[in-house]
Image: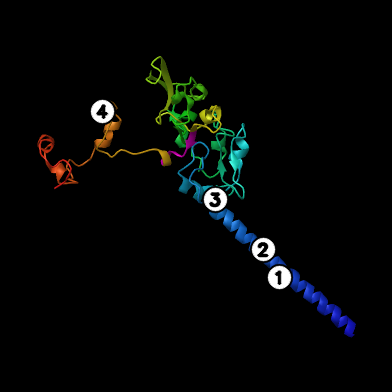
Amino acid sequence: MEKRNKEVLTRRREFLVRTLQGTGLTAMGGLVWGGYVGMAKTSPLVLRPPAALPEKEFLAGCIKCGLCVEACPYKALKLARPGDPHPLGTPYFVPRERPCYMCEDIPCVPACPTGVLDPSRVSEKDGNGKDVLNINLARMGLAVIDRETCIAYWGVQCDACHRACPLLDKAITVETSRNERTGHHAFLAPMVHSDFCTGCGLCERACITEKASIFVLPRELVMGKATQRYVRGWDTKDEERLQGISTDVTTETKASEKKAMNYLNEDDLLTDE
């Protein structure tokens, strides 16, 4: 009887130890998983598929189903995994590894069951007034050029990014200027135009430098924004921003109260008094 009681106590002790070990591992797993999630939420550099809603709305509606990833014929899209610097289970792409190849039918968009890849963001009316998809309307990001490392800005002839761009001479153009350093050559430098750049990343993939000198970033991080009072006079659509703008002038400094001619002919150029 005494021997049997000892066996029961031993089994109970082993059970309690295993239970506590399991609880500890579960808690540790939760902490590790929480760490991954916390880290993932800190990265603002994620690039989403075409037609994605703004990031906050996208994350609120994305159910991490992976259907858009499965629909991509070029396997450009990935689902974020633990350890990736993006919210877990959400789709993204890395242009340097595999860019968006600008499919005309944009299969990843209709595959989305929740609408966070919104077809209206990449649609236009055809001649019959019907909505049709147009991948050229996508704004996944914006290509940015590091002029310090781009060899075209050194004076070396290279147009790899220009030739790779699917919107040739629209999203990326080549601007020529005299190379004053040599006096005999010209700079043939790429320039990105935000009105047309889709953020597909084909230029980044094609860049010949060891680390790409042209790279795609989320548009909200790299684009400035002019106030409503400044417009491009040659762009009639841009002038629409003036509608409803007050004509009242706000004086920021005492110097700005003066007329320009008087201000320039006085001795107080270095003071606002």
Q: Is residue 112 left or right of residue 239?
A: right
Residue holding disc 1: 20
Q: How far, Cα to Cα, is label 4 from label 3? A: 43 Å
Q: Is residue 263 left or right of residue 61?
A: left
Magenta-drawn stretch contains 183: no
Residue holding disc 2: 26
User: As shown in the figure, which amino acid type bears the numbered disc 3?
Assistant: Ala
User: As shown in the figure, which amino acid type bears the numbered disc 4?
Assistant: Gly
Sequence-first disc among 4 and 1: 1
Few, some or many C-alpha atoms within 10 Å of disc 3 (few <14, some 14-19, many ≥20)?
many
Q: How far, Cα to Cα, is label 4 from label 1? A: 72 Å
Task: Depth check: give the residue in front, 109 or 258.
Answer: 258
Sequence-first disc among 3 and 2: 2
Few, some or many C-alpha atoms within 10 Å of disc 2 (few <14, some 14-19, many ≥20)?
few
Give the residues in magenta.
Answer: 215-220
Q: Is residue 237 left or right of residue 29?
A: left
Residue holding disc 4: 233
Task: Inspect this view and state whether residue 238 appears.
Answer: yes
Few, some or many C-alpha atoms within 10 Å of disc 1 (few <14, some 14-19, many ≥20)?
few
